[in-house]
Amino acid sequence: MSAPALSPRPRIIDTDVHNAFADIRAELRPYLSREWQVYAERHGIVVPSTDYASHMGVQREDARTPSGGLAGSDPAFLFTDHLDRYGSDTAILNGSHVLGLSVHPDPDWGHAIATAYNQNLANRWLSPPTVSAAPSS
Amino acid sequence: MNHSDPAAAAKEILATQPIEESDCPEQLLQVLEMINAPKKILFSSGYSH
């Protein structure tokens, strides 16, 4: 086995990056079954809160997307605004809005949301494949 | 994570965001040195928070 090529500088892996949804119901809808789409339209997609709160707000206001969307909700902008700016090679995506899914009181609905989340994540965020993601469980 | 096993705990690595700051930054550096931070702490920005 040959030695791996030396990179010009150490690789930077950011272990905590939060991709987000500008509109979780619209973005997960294509990945829900028809039955769950009807359910989501009637009840919304509500995930139990983890009660992490900040008087400044959790999402950075100065990192909103060019169209004014929630910080972290635009893959291309996240790349330029964060990874490229600071020279990070790899980011581990820990998601937003879904950290409480593991304790959703309705396991069937929680499972449907988790599946839709993961499929959305793969399609929307994992190309180019320089970003690894922590799957929602 | 098994806190009853110090040897296992000593092998743990972690990331934290945010991190508590001290009015005296030197104290934070001392703590980082005590816990062997270069081998323990992962870089984590927490972006978009």
Image (cartoon, grey):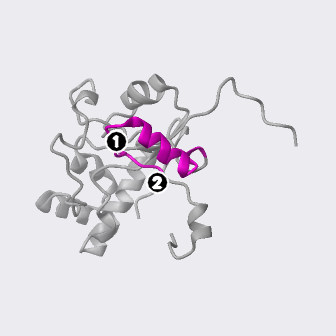
B22 magenta-colored: yes
- Front residue of this view, candidates B47 and A22: B47
Marks 2 and 1, how far apart at CA: 28 Å
Q: Could you say where residue A19 lies in the image, as x and y percent from the top left?
A: 36, 43
Q: Residue at x 43, y 37 (%)?
A: B26
Quarter holding residue A61: top left
| Residue at numbered disc 2 | A134
Number of other residues with Cα within 10 Å of mark 1, as a class: few under 14, some 14 to 19, many 20 or more? few
- Please give the name of the residue rendered at 61% of the width and 48% of the height, measured from the top-left corner: B39
- The quadrant of the image that shows the C terminus of chain A is bottom left
Q: Which residue is mark 1?
A: B21
**Position above or below: A10 against A101:** above
Horizontal side of residue A57 vs A92, given as left or right: left
Badge 2: few (under 14), some or many (20 or more) residues near its Cα, within 10 Å?
few
Could you tell me residue A39's position as x and y percent?
A: 18, 64
* Residue A88 percent across, percent down from the top left: 52, 31
Viewer-side residue, A130 vs A25: A130
* Quadrant hosting residue A65: top left
| Letter of the chain that mark 1 sits on in the rendering | B
Residue A108: x and y in percent read 30, 73
Q: Give the camera-side residue of A21 and A6.
A: A6
Closer to us: mark 2 or mark 1? 1
The residues colored magenta run: B15-38
* On-image quarter of the N terminus of chain A: top right
The amino acid sitting under disc 2 is Ala
